[in-house]
Image (cartoon, rainbow, N blue to C red):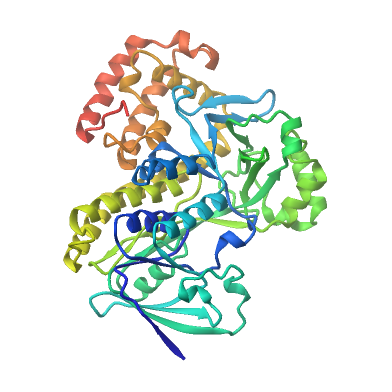
Amino acid sequence: STFMADGSQPITIVGAGLVGALLATVLARRGYRVTVYERYGDIRAIPSSGRSINLVATARGLRALTLLPDDVRARLLELGVRVTGRVIHAGGEPIFQRYGKDDSEFNYSISRYELNKFLISEAEAAGATLRFGHRLLGVELEGEYPVLTFAAPHEASGQRGVLDSALHAEDNTGAEREVVVRCGGPVVAADGGGSAVRQALSSAGACAVHSSLLDSGYKEMSFPRAAAEAGGMARHGLHIWPRGSHMLMGLANLDGSFTGTIYMLNQAGDATLADDASAGASFEDVEAQGVASAAAFLEAHYATALPLLGGVEAAARQLAENPRGILGTVRARQWAVGGKAVLVGDAAHAIVPFFGQGMNCGFEDVHELVRLLDEHAAPAVASPAGYAAAFAAFEAARKPNADAIADMALENYVEMQSSTADPQFRLCKAVENALENSPLGARFRSRYAMVCYGGAGNVTYANAQALGRVQWEIVLELAKGVSSAEEAAAQLDVAQAERLLAERLQPLQKEVQGELAT
């Protein structure tokens, strides 16, 4: 049977993940009538599922939080642990590689689960209506605004705005009904990398999509608090064990534990780095004899991490038995369908996690979309033409930047797996840091800093990519005159650096109007 829900709400958001919930909070506070439809049950009542990389929130993404009241922003940041650089475990003593120029520049390590729970509660407090357990079946685009069809469980008390906390889509055995929503305004698709809205738009010929999966996958590995503390794991670092074609990383949690993630080829033979000593290691091989093969692999490659992971037995069980996650890049060629629908966040541009920018890029989307809605379709004057103008401007502004960070995230995968352990690379990073802290610092920001701390002053992802290419060439040139990473600050040729910046970098900065002292 078909149940006609009243769909008179001006803005409908599909997906109550990080981007959907933040957007719902901000738009509801601005006076739009917001309804959010989420496929799964309310995560506030479901324990963490054990396959989610800790998020890295950087200044770029956090700029979107200026759209929230100060007290909400302060409470959100309390969920995070400050991280000021990478800690590289490459054999010998761990090496600290700073992210920014000093401790004033840091990222936050935040649990996706805790952040999502927080934002859903804020969306509700702001007046948004949330409907959980609603799985999208179809999108009709014929009318002025879309008609959405959902499958929802019969007992979905969420239909009346009450949260049914026990609800989880997988648990419903045939007890679904159809819900048709005639939207009184546009639909914002914030339903993630596997977006059902994007698939529906693609089927209707409204949006071409390109997606590519990496040959590698990931598994979560937990560093228990007692083991991490006993081993003196620095909480201010992103810990990386780079091993060529695979790597382990760990990020601090509020409770003293660390969330670890191991990245590796899914199947042997996929290795593009065939000359690499560690090539050939794959999840398939490691899982082959269960805990025994996982233990042998960990003892061979990650001996220094084992005490921190709570011992070989606990670590091997996690590696053998935890579910595998997929890593991929999705690029939607069109994000907007007139004033009817727009894709945001991972639904428009899913990227691999190796620059820690997936959520930051999505939050930057929210900041930009809200700014353009203010300009073209504020609540009191919103019209189909106004929405169309806002969505077209949003796509034009954000798509080149989403493409740029997608590329840079793939490049950073190689950097993290192999380059971080390379002495020449370490030397270059030290030269880069010396340059940032020299009197020339205002004219030079590392690509990492532009990506993570940029955003204002027109250092968009696309500009960071273009400037970063030229800057790395300058760093390589300057590194020739430096004997070791430790001597970089003392041996940096400031006069040569000044000349190279003036010749190669400043013309490009003028071209992109990038103001670097952000």
Point out the image quarter for the C terminus. Answer: top left
Identify the residue shown where x is 51% and y is 52%: 118
Q: Is the residue 38 above or below the residue 268 in the image? A: below
Left or right: where 360 falls relative to 333: right
Front residue of 65/271: it is 65
Front residue of 184/496: it is 184
Residue 195, percent across and down?
44, 66
Left or right: where 226 falls relative to 380: right
Which of the 4 quarters of the picture holds residue 19?
bottom left
Q: Is the residue 7 above or below the residue 440 in the image? A: below
Residue 213, percent across and down?
50, 58
Left or right: where 194 falls relative to 462: right
Left or right: where 476 falls relative to 303: left
Identify the residue shown where x is 45% and y is 49%: 359
**Residue 16 visible in the displayed image:** yes
Identify the residue shown where x is 72% and y is 51%: 319
Front residue of 434/55: it is 55
